[in-house]
Image (cartoon, helix red, strand yellow):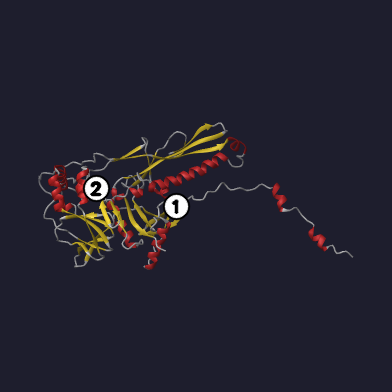
């Protein structure tokens, strides 16, 4: 008798799936793209229509200008001041004599300071301007109960003491103590007086600065508005007016553009069930939106990371982002809407909270749970760079025109608009039967008042 079991097992008993798939309709997903993020900054910024393409930020006149950081260059152990950078000192703001600035830059004296050493002592004559070339220092003043009160931190490029050079007899109101090893550059009052004696232009400039400094100012450095309160009878009321900046900043809309090409044969024959041209445009627009958020943060003209006022930039106390650091950042402004940080920085902040036994309550934005501190959400954005030394930054912002905050700028109703301020314009079909489309996105951002935007600098991410 013949054994047919092996033969029976090798014969196909039904239609195979490989053949059946030839008759089936394949379910397809739209084209996917790596690198698409939630783009929270674009979603949370209030957007203001700019019909003329330019947005002018008018402000009250402020006297405390030129309070920036001074640029320095180093050659081996030698650190030198860049002459033009001396105009970042309020005392020399607007002074343009290159020869005098160079002479002053060459007269700075360099010295090294050990950790814990006092750089200047409270009560001693304030007869020099001091630049912190490298390291970290703290300002200290006696507290009510004889404890040292920390007034602030100083990092690379910060300076102090230039106000005292415009007058005589002033004393240091605080001490400055080195936290790490520091390199400081000092310019004495005698050198400045000698330079002023040799340069009538510098002498006139210093005298004009002293007069401006004596003008009545409010706590924000704006021209004070004289007023009277609590008086009785027919007291003579003070007379005042509100002055404006003569050269307000203007923000022009920036543009991100690309040319998309689609072959007419592809668009004509292969657009079912999905329109090839529309899918190409969808992916292109998504990439442009990613670039838009990157530019809003990193563009050197209007990017938020480059437009934080120097008084609103604070260093970390110890390196990693701590609750104390975020408290300091919150205290610099009213009604902070949200923090913005790289996801790895948010993770580092979480580790610091856990180390202290703190577990912040999350908050929800548009249905997404986010880490929060003091009820203010910490919004993630991978567009904030992480530098090669493993540090990054945290932004804190108040938003909206009504709150004098940070706003996004765009223009509605542009030709061939497919989304607000985004246009897709058909250029034409070239000789290879390829249809070209010009895709343009117009945008910018503005900071209405300096305290609307703050930044925690040099945040260490750690392991």
Question: Which percent across, then down, holds residue 247?
Answer: 26, 39
What quarter of the picture does the N terminus occupy? Answer: bottom right
Element assignment for label 2: helix
Disc number placed over residue 366 in the picture, else none: 1
Question: Which percent across, then down, holds residue 113?
Answer: 24, 62
Horizontal side of residue 390 vs 33, given as left or right: left
- Is residue 6 depicted above or below 32 in this figure? below
Q: Is residue 450 visible?
A: yes
Q: Is residue 94 visible?
A: no
Crowding at mark 1 (Cα within 10 Å: few <14, some 14-19, many 20+): few
Residue closer to the observer: 200 or 38: 200
Disc number placed over residue 421 in the picture, else none: none
Horizontal side of residue 23 vs 42, given as left or right: right
> Which residue sits furthest right?
1
Residue closer to the observer: 426 or 376: 426
- The mark nearer the N terminus, 2 or 1, is 2
Spatial CA distance of label 2 from label 1 is 50 Å
User: Who's the residue at 42% across and 61% down the image?
Assistant: 347
Crowding at mark 2 (Cα within 10 Å: few <14, some 14-19, many 20+): many
Question: Which percent across, then down, holds residue 57?
Answer: 30, 41
Disc number placed over residue 83 in the picture, else none: 2
Quarter of image, res 262: top right
What quarter of the picture does the C terminus occupy? Answer: bottom left
Q: Nearer the viewer, mark 2 or mark 1?
A: 2
């Amino acid at each position: 008798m013949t054994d047919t079991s092996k033969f029976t097992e090798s014969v196909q008993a039904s239609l195979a799936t490989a053949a059946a798939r030839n008759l089936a309709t394949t379910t397809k997903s739209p084209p996917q793209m790596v690198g698409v993020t939630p783009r929270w900054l674009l979603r949370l910024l209030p957007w203001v229509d700019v019909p003329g393409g330019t947005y002018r930020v008018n402000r009250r006149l402020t006297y405390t200008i030129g309070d920036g950081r001074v640029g320095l260059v180093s050659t081996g152990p030698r650190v030198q001041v860049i002459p033009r950078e001396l105009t970042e000192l309020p005392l020399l703001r607007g002074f343009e004599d290159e020869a005098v600035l160079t002479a002053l830059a060459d007269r700075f004296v360099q010295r090294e300071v050990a950790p814990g050493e006092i750089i200047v002592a409270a009560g001693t004559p304030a007869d020099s301007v001091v630049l912190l070339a490298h390291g970290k220092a703290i300002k200290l003043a006696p507290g009510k109960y004889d404890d040292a009160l920390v007034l602030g931190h100083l990092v690379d490029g910060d300076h102090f003491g230039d106000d005292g050079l415009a007058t005589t007899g002033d004393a240091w109101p605080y001490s400055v103590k080195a936290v790490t090893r520091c390199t400081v550059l000092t310019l004495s009052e005698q050198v400045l007086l000698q330079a002023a004696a040799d340069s009538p232009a510098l002498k006139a400039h210093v005298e004009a600065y002293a007069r401006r400094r004596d003008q009545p100012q409010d706590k924000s450095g704006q021209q004070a508005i004289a007023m009277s309160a609590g008086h009785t009878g027919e007291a003579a009321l003070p007379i005042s007016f509100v002055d404006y900046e003569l050269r307000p900043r203007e923000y022009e809309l920036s543009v991100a553009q690309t040319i998309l090409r689609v072959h007419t044969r592809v668009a004509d024959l292969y657009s079912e069930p999905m329109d090839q041209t529309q899918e190409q445009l969808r992916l292109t627009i998504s990439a442009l939106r990613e670039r838009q958020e990157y530019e809003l943060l990193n563009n050197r003209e209007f990017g938020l990371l480059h437009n934080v006022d120097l008084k609103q930039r604070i260093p970390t106390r110890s390196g990693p982002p701590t609750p104390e650091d975020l408290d300091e950042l919150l205290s610099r402004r009213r009604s902070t809407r949200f923090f913005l940080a790289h996801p790895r920085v948010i993770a580092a902040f979480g580790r610091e909270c856990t180390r202290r036994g703190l577990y912040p309550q999350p908050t929800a934005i548009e249905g997404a749970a986010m880490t929060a501190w003091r009820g203010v959400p910490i919004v993630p954005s991978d567009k904030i760079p992480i530098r090669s030394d493993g540090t990054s930054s945290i932004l804190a912002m108040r938003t909206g025109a009504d709150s004098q905050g940070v706003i996004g700028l765009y223009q509605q109703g542009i030709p061939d608009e497919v989304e607000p301020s985004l246009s897709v314009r058909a250029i034409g079909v070239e000789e290879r039967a390829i249809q070209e489309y010009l895709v343009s996105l117009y945008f910018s951002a503005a900071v209405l008042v300096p305290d609307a935007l703050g930044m925690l600098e040099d945040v260490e991410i750690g392991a």
